[in-house]
Amino acid sequence: MTDRGGVVPLIEFETFGVAVGSAQVCGALSTFVPLFVAPTATLAALALAGWVSRTRRQEVLSRRGIGLSRGLALGVLGGTAVGFLAPPALLAPARGLVLALGLLPLFIAERLQSRPRPLHRDLP
């Protein structure tokens, strides 16, 4: 591998955001067409892998670095994953949508954590 010397690509493809958005659409479709349940689960796994890759590059993947909001969001995603694998009878038809909605807290927490901080200047 070679160092690109800080060259920024013209178009950046963010795996995490695209997978979360696609999982939302696929999860909503899975309530009407049950064949979309498997792609929803695949997109959820891709979103989680994209999130792990992104946070590893930022070097915050540790107990202290994850923070409360990301930790809670991962807990919600874990709970929805359990609900996806062993759904109660009431939620069985919408289990793809429930899994997709479980990605939203992680997406929101990530956006809040990675938001650029405002520049403060001392005025004379």
Image (cartoon, rainbow, N blue to C red):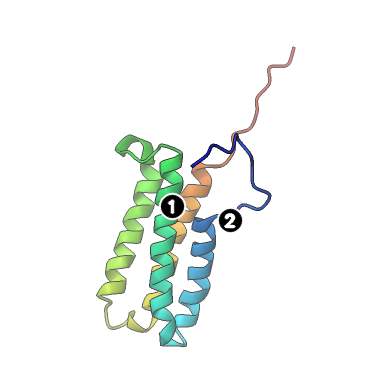
Which residue corresponds to the image point at 30% horizontal and 63% vertical from the top-left? 79
Three-letter code for the amino acid on which mark 1 is drawn: Trp
| Residue position marked by numbered label 2 in the rendering | 13
Q: Inspect the image, locate mark 2, and give the three-letter code of the amino acid beneath it.
A: Phe
Q: Secondary structure at mark 1?
A: helix
Residue 8, percent from left and from top = 64, 42
- The correct choice, above or below, for 122 with respect to 41 in the image is above
Q: Which residue is mark 1?
A: 51
In the image: residue 121, left or right of residue 100: right
Residue at 32%, 82% (x, y): give it: 92
Q: Residue furthest front?
A: 1
Q: Is residue 85 above or below residue 10?
A: below
For marks 1 and 2, the one nearer the N-term is 2
Q: CA distance from mark 1 to mark 2?
A: 13 Å
Image: 3 above or below 119: below
Going by the image, does 15 lie left or right of 61?
Answer: right
Asked if residue 54 can be seen in this view, the reply is yes
- The picture places residue 31, in percent across and down from the top left corner, at 44, 83
